[in-house]
Amino acid sequence: MLGVFGILYFTGLHTEAIGQVQRLLLATGIRNAEVPETLQNPDANAVVEAAVAANPNMAGAGFKMVDLNGKVTNFESLKGKVVFLNIWATWCPPCVAEMPNIQRLHDKIAGENVAFVMLSVDEGGMEKVKKYIDKKGYTFPVYMPASSFPQEFYSNAIPTTFIISPEGKIVAKQEGMADYDTKEVREFLVGLAKK
């Protein structure tokens, strides 16, 4: 048993192997993403409007990110869309575990005024991230930070996922892996985009 773990570790496949085990855990439905209760009712608009009135600045204002083709994007350019922001890294088994369900979510709601920002915090550079994404065949937009990281996006864990309203307010935060390809999450994101 130790020999198997040693081989996985030294070949760099341990992240993928642990991710596969965690993916099985996600498939059980035990770690589904939670949709905020305050936004599951008809008063959701009032909650978002109150948050906007309290702080008119967009979460992540001034933050720049670069896509895997080298194009720099201002985070503020996403204002007016719901933003599904996932902070991840290639060396993180829970990140690896949840990515297939994020890809399925992306495929199902693409074009619904929801912007996906898969923000890699890998220190190995863009080529490592690009190689990983290409190998897996993921098509969601992947970025890396191109300026200092906004305080609002700090977390004690990765992966961490934020859902940001079209007005630029963080309305949900999920630390750790979760299954996002659920009816509740899809309805929440599409409903928020239509408000």
Image (cartoon, rainbow, N blue to C red):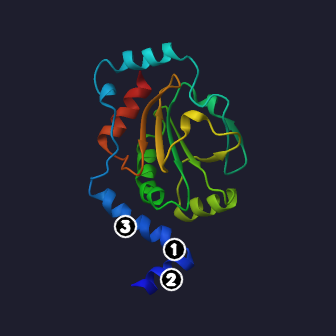
x, y percent for residue 168 = 53, 25
Q: Which residue is mark 3?
A: 21
- Relative placement, left or right, of 125 versus 155 is right
Q: Is residue 28 left or right of residue 100?
A: left
Using the numbered discs, state the Cα–Cα distance from disc 3 to disc 2 in whole angstroms.
17 Å
User: Mark 1 vs mark 3: which is more N-terminal?
Assistant: 1
Relative vertical location of residue 162 with respect to residue 41 in this rendering, above or below: below
Q: Residue at x 36, y 33 (%)?
A: 188
> Mark 3 belongs to which amino acid?
Val
Residue at image x 37%, y 62%?
22
Give me the C-alpha separation between circle 1 and circle 2: 8 Å
Q: Position of residue 108 (x, y in %)?
A: 41, 44
| SS state under label 3 | helix
Q: Nearer the viewer, mark 1 or mark 2?
A: 2
The kind of residue on which mark 1 rests is: Leu
Residue that lies at the very extreme toward the bottom in this rendered image: 3
Q: Residue furthest front?
A: 156
> Label 1, label 3: how many angstroms apart (C-alpha)?
13 Å
Instruction: Say which mark, if any, is on residue 13.
Output: 1
For label 3, count other residues whose C-alpha is less than 10 Å away and answer few (under 14), some (14-19) or many (20+).
Answer: few
| Residue for badge 2 | 7
